[in-house]
Each structure stands twice: as C-alpha cells, then as structure tokens.
Image (cartoon, rainbow, N blue to C red):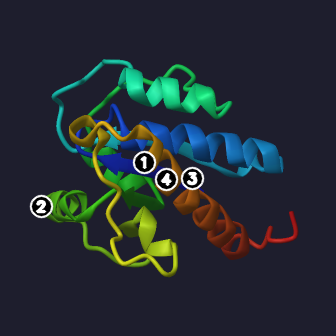
C-alpha cells in the first residue's frame, strides 16, 4: 500500500506525518506492506531538510526524522500512490487543482479522528506550535494505520 502525506511546503507537517507513520508501521512489524512518502504542493523548499521545529519535536518523542528532504508532488505521485493524505482544506484544494478528487483515497488526515470539529492540521511554519501539530498528526496516524490494517486484512497485528 502506497501512502503519500501532502502539505504545502513539505518541511513541517507532511514529513512529520511520514516519520510518525513510518515508526508506527515498524513497531507493528508491517513495514514491508507499506511505501510511505511525503511531498509538498509547492516547490519552495525543494531539497531542504525538515524544519528545525519538526526535527526537534520528532526527536523529543523518539521518532527519527531519517533522511527526509522536501520535494514537490509530481504527476507520477498522483498515479502511483494509493492514498493521498492531506493536512488541511487548502491541501485538498491544491490536489483538486491537480485533477485529484477527494474520496476514499484522498482525504485530510484528521478526517479519521472522530469528535474533532476542526479537521485541519495547522501549519506550524506560521503558528510555531509544533507540539500541537505532533499531537494531531500522531492521532491521525494511529487512526490511519488502524484503517489500513483492517482494509488490508492485517487487523490482528
């Protein structure tokens, strides 16, 4: 199953989601069942490492940022990935401009978290609140992994 996390610049939210989700699948022992990546709708930060706030927050929670570098989403990504997981409404609109329609394989990460009124992961590049973003992304990744394990028939892990 190929999962692509999408945000605007691919230096804060989507690389955080990629690193968290990667750790979760490794802890479950199902990493061979997934291809996990992240990309940005813009190329503003192409080739850059994740934002320092993202790296520090991940490390504080024992999550390795690995060798992540920002990249812009491509037409190939839109065809190759099974799931495009956006961080907010703007990212969904950006995907729509690329010809992708929201649906079962294209949605906001927090759409999976019940009881939340605001389904957008705020951009810490502007808010500075990497802790809040970590909590939200972690919650969404837990639900995403549960959903995908059930869909793939590996729910007993």
Find the distance from the CA under tag 1 to the CA under tag 2. Answer: 25 Å
Find the distance from the CA under tag 3 to the CA under tag 2. Answer: 28 Å
Disc number lying in front (1 or 2):
1
- Report the residue marked by disc 4: 137
Whether pointer 3 and pointer 4 mark residues with C-beta atoms closer than 8 Å, the reply is yes
Res. 1 mark = none
Give residue 87's position: percent from left, percent from top. Answer: 34, 56
Q: Residue at x 32, y 36 (%)?
A: 10
Give residue 152's position: percent from left, percent from top. Answer: 71, 70
- Report the residue marked by disc 2: 97
- Report the residue marked by disc 3: 138
Find the distance from the CA under tag 4 to the CA under tag 2. Answer: 24 Å
Name the N-terminal-most of marks 3 and 1: 1
Q: Nearer the viewer, residue 33 or 45?
A: 45
- Direction from residue 27 to residue 110 in the image, left or right: left
Name the N-terminal-most of marks 3 and 2: 2
Name the N-terminal-most of marks 1 and 2: 2
- Report the residue marked by disc 1: 133
């Amino acid at each position: 199953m190929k999962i692509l996390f999408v945000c605007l610049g691919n230096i804060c939210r989507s690389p955080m989601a990629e690193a968290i989700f990667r750790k979760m699948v490794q802890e479950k022992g199902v990493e061979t069942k997934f291809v996990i990546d992240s990309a940005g709708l813009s190329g503003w930060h192409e080739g850059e490492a994740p934002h320092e706030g993202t790296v520090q927050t991940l490390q504080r929670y024992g999550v390795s940022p690995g060798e992540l570098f920002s990249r812009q989403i491509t037409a190939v990504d839109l065809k190759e990935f099974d799931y495009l997981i956006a961080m907010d409404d703007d990212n969904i609109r950006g995907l729509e401009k690329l010809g992708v329609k929201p649906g079962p394989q294209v949605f906001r990460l927090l759409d999976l978290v019940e009881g939340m009124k605001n389904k957008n992961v705020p951009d810490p590049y502007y808010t500075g609140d990497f802790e809040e973003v970590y909590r939200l992304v972690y919650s969404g990744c837990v639900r995403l992994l549960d959903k995908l394990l059930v869909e793939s028939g590996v729910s007993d892990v």
